[in-house]
Amino acid sequence: MAERVALTGNDSAAYALKQINPDVMAVYPITPQTELMHKFAAYVADGEVVTELVRVESEHSAMSAVVGASVAGARAATATSANGLALMWEVLYIAASCRCPVVACVVNRALSGPINIHCDHSDTMGARDSGWLQLYCENCQEVYDNTIQAVRIAEHPDVRLPVMVCFDGFILSHTLEALEVNDDETVRRFIGQFERPDNLLDVAHAQTFGMFALQNYYYEFKKQQVDAMANAPAVIQQIGDEYAELTGRSYGLLDAYRCDDADVILLGLGSTMGTVKQAADDLGEQEGLKCGVLKIRSFRPFPAEQILQAIAGAQIVGVMDRAVSFGLGGPLFHEVRSARYGHQDGPMLDFIYGLGGRDLGLDDAKGIFRSLADASESGRYEPTTRYVGVRE
């Protein structure tokens, strides 16, 4: 049975984790994730979960703790932001390489310096090749829903990789929104029991394992991770379909909005896509511009085929990046352009926005659409990378 509640993004994730009731959760505070940890700690203190809450001395230790718990057969989770994710860096790769189906809620925050506690995607974009799946959320409802689905996705035998549930710091983490939540029993039936078939904590047959692989095996381990990531799109879609049957809320790899007959399509991640959808509505009604929005839910695995299908009819495509890559455009732009190479022609522009929490308002989003339409009409596509709202 569903219930209508008002929760912040942090509380939405904590509530989902309460219903998941992981065996182990390792926690360490960092703004703007801290309230998520506090809320879940309250559930532990009040006896609403049986989770072993491990209060560690750093984020490196937090990820180490959940890796140890996972290989011992436990369902394990954690949460962090920005510099905390960076301190986990070494162990992120170990979690993926050991095929630990850990879930980590990552509250997106600029990866300093200078120090900044507000939102951009530089933290999780830096971890995009660590072997973790990444799901991005537009609103608090998606924070709740994605956290629950992430457990099933991570633990699926065709995947067995860790999953990050990414949501924008302060914009979502501290914003109160209305959402629907399921009852505890419904969630626990949906995720099921976790049984790791290669549980290393077998006290009846104690063994010691050295996590060391030289050139005679290492390559094969990496290829197995690649294959698991390739399996993930079908699993994400399958679990999203099952979740739709349960809740009426449908999830796939991406969400296409007004794209069917759009001349101009904007792609992006996270909370800003709600603003961009409103801009597309307004420009269609007020100025007759045919604007579409393609919200990417799954950045890893990257849904290249589905993106190409969605943008095939557009005259011009824009990509919105809330992170910089010190190459040719932002990280999402790199991925989309690579996906199109050799398969699909047409102009593309990249828009860097919102670094360090800089606001992107409705007028800014409309301006991006208009600049794409103007470039398409004039045939002038330089500069390819544009910086929205920066003072120069």
Image (cartoon, helix red, strand yellow):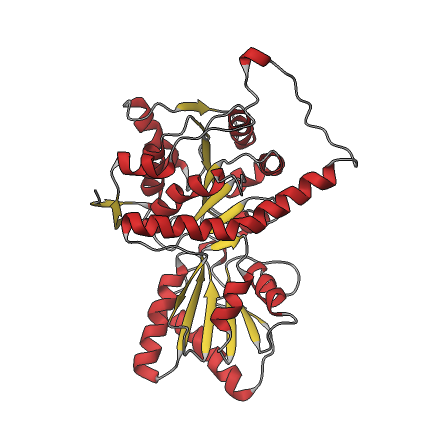
The residue depicted at 32 percent of the width and 36 percent of the height is: 189
Along the line of sight, the residue nearer the viewer: 242 or 133:
242
Picture quarter containing residue 369?
A: bottom left
Quadrant in the picture for the C terminus = bottom right
Along the line of sight, the residue nearer the viewer: 338 or 289:
338
Is 260 above or below relative to 129?
below
The residue depicted at 41 percent of the width and 79 percent of the height is: 261
Q: Position of residue 68 (x, y in %)?
A: 55, 25
Quadrant in the picture for the N terminus = top left
Is 285 above or below relative to 356?
below
Residue most extreme to the bottom: 378
Along the line of sight, the residue nearer the viewer: 57 or 185:
185
Q: Count of labels shown?
A: 0
Q: Position of residue 300 (x, y in %)?
A: 54, 51
Q: Position of residue 348 (x, y in %)?
A: 56, 74
Q: Is residue 120 left or right of residue 338?
A: left
Residue most extreme to the top: 204
